Structure formats: structure tokens, C-alpha cells
Amino acid sequence: MTNQRNAELCEKSRAEIKSLRAYQPGKPIDELAREFGLNADDIVKLASNENPIGPSKKAIAAMEKEARELTRYPDGNGFDLKQALCKKLSVGSVIIAPENITLGNGSSDILDFIVKCFVAKGDEVVFSQHAFAIYGLVTKIQGGECNVVPAKNYGHDLDAMAKAISDKTRLVFVTNPNNPTGTWLTQAEIAEFMAKVPSDVVVVLDEAYFEYVNEAEYANGLTLISNYSNLVVTRTFSKAYGLASLRVGYGISSPEVADLMNRVRPPFNVNSFALAAAIATLNDTDYVAESKSVNDAGMVYLTQSFDQLGLPYVPSVGNFISFEIPLVVNITAVEVDKKLLAVGVIVRPIANYEMPNHLRVSIGTQAENETFIAALIKILADARS
Ligand SMILES: *Cc1c(COP(=O)(O)O)cnc(C)c1O
């Protein structure tokens, strides 16, 4: 009887929600430990592009201090974090003021706010094939339509994306570098694209992996904020800043668009631990430098290993890399993933990103990378014999 009533009630939910499926995160370590009877300490998780070196010690100290204030609501306007961001981000001709900043419970929050502000039922949102799953999810929740533009060499085809914009288009997502492919766009490419986009169409430039990129030509979206009132740049503390668990990210935009986003932002969406830890890590330049150098070394090690194993991969500038299990190795990507899980290595299958023959591995510590490669070598050798 209850089940029947539950089903009847759910039938009344909005059609947009009924057709959705919940976002599939990377498998948590404890879940795998339970399933396979493994020791959680022996499990290597390289599935969610998390920072492998542990949090900044300064972040932990800041949180310990904050713990004494647990009874108070956090600063709903994030005054101190905004001040710290303005100081950090205002470089050269770029001037960022608190009015340009919207704080999010992760940068995913900002992606949700901007879509809520601009996308109504039937409006179209343009993004690339192989782009971040959240874009489609937040669009569909609003009743928007996804216009997914075929990728070029696994990366964004910005010419095709500009051409895909129609009268129905309200918003475009551009990911630089892209997840899960690690492909990237230059300053010239982004500037040329912005010049083509109508000024009443919002462009969200998702720079979640900005801090990892070493390429001299890589675009910094913040340099274009003062020229384009339709540009929103998003960044996060979840990756290079090592605070994925706390959920804190931000959007940079014109003050007018930031004001719109603040209207849909839930009150106190960023908690006091997240605010304190974000400020502490932002000022811990050694921590970010260490994160980058571990990542750079891991990228060299993994790509050399894939080369030796004859596994093709998409060259990446992020903290992850998508590699292919080619047909000739006699085992599918799904099977490799299962066998990796059985020995306690979690990577990410990306069939839902239309890359069924690839797996995405996040770059870990050298020891984690070696565990992963050793397991992969054994699985491929077993498949060949
Ligand atoms: C990880 C990631 C984010 C950031 O997510 P948070 O909500 O800030 O943790 C945003 N965009 C892309 C493409 C990502 O991979």
C-alpha cells in the first residue's frame, strides 16, 4: 500500500525530474572496502580528481580555531574569503572586487545558480560532447534543452559551438581544461569565441583545473571579465587547493550577474570551516606549489607508462588523464575497471561521457601511481595470455 502511494506521489513530480538519474560520483573508498573485504588503508582512489597530498596544514589549523564558533552561523557574505580572493586574483590588468564574486558550496553550486538565473523551460544550453556531467543535469532540472556539440580530437570545437548558438540559446558552458579529456584552449581561442557570442547569451567558463595548467598560451578567463558582462568564470578549492570535502568554489562575473546569482544562492551555502580553510590554503603558496609538482611528476610517470604499455591516451593538462583500452588487448575498459576494483584501485569509467573504451585516472602520489600501473600491467598480461 505504501509503495503504491509512494509511486503515485512520485508520478506527480515534475516531468523534468522524472526523466533524470542521480549524478554518479566516483566510488568511495569505504564502499569498495565493504564490497571486496579489503582494508580501506590499502585502497588507492584515483577516481575523482582529488588532491592526493592531503590538505594544507594551515587549513587544518584554521578549522581547529573555527570549531569553537560552531554555534554561530557562518558569514553569509563570505567577507574575508572574498577579500583574500580579490588580493590573490587581481594581477596585472585584472582587477577583481568583492562585487564580482559569488561563493558556492563547491563550484557546482555556481553552475546551478547561473542556470537557474537564465534558463527557463525550452531554453537551450550549448556545451561540448565529453563535457562535465553536471552541465546536462542542472540544465534539465530547469527544463532546458541540451545542445551537445560534437568534440574535435576529444576537445571543444569552439567554431562549431559558436555556430550552434541560436535564438533559443541562453547559455554556453566552456570547460578549460575539460574534464574528463584534459584538453585545453588558448587565450586567443577564448577571446575569439567571446567576440562571436551574442552579448545576451551567457558564457560559463569552467576553470576547475586552472591552477594545474603549465602551458604559456593557456587562457585566463579573468582577463576578459571587464570586457564581457555575459562571462562567468568558475573556479574551485576542490582540486589544486585540496578541499574537495568542504565544498567551496566561486564564480567571477560582472557585479550585476553576481547580484542575480546571489538572489538564488541559499543563505549560508558556504560553511565556516570551508571559508576558513579556503583562506588559509589560498595563502599557503607552498602547498599549491607542492600539489603542482606532485602532479607534474605523476603526469610524466603515467604517460610514460601508458606509452610503454601501448595504451593510447588523450594528452591532458589537468590532474587526471583518460587512457584507452584498445581492442587489440583482448579486454574491455569495463573489465579492466572491475579487475582494478578487485585489487583495490578505483579509477573512473567514462562510458557516460561517450568514451566507452577509455578510463580516467586521477594523478596520485608516486606510490599510488605505481600501485595503479603495477595492477594494470598484471591485468593486461593476464588478458594477453
Ligand atoms: C571537479 C570539477 C568541478 C568542481 O566541482 P566542485 O563542485 O567545485 O567540487 C567543476 N567543473 C569540473 C569540470 C570539474 O571537473
Image (cartoon, rainbow, N blue to C red):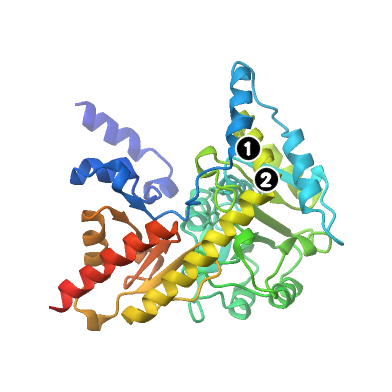
Task: State the mark number for residue 284.
Answer: 2
Foreground: 280 or 94? 280
Q: Secondary structure at mark 2?
A: loop
The earlier-in-sequence mark between 2 and 1 is 1
| C-alpha distance separating marks 2 and 1 | 7 Å
Foreground: 122 or 269? 269
Q: Quadrant of residue 46?
A: bottom left
Residue under the point 55% across and 52% down:
239
Task: Give how far across and how far down residue 265 sits, in percent.
Answer: 64, 38
Task: Give how far across and how far down residue 60 sits, in percent.
Answer: 57, 34
Q: Which residue is mark 1?
A: 58
Residue under the point 62% across and 49% down:
287
Relative placement, left or right, of 324 versus 173 is left
What's the residue type where badge 2 is placed?
Asp
> On screen, 313 above or below 283?
below
Residue under the point 25% across and 55% down:
341
Q: Quadrant of residue 305?
A: bottom left
Q: Residue furthest right?
A: 93
Q: Quadrant of the N terminus?
A: top left
Task: State the mark number for residue 198.
Answer: none
Residue 235 shows in the view: yes
Task: Give how far across and how far down residue 301 sits, in percent.
Answer: 44, 70
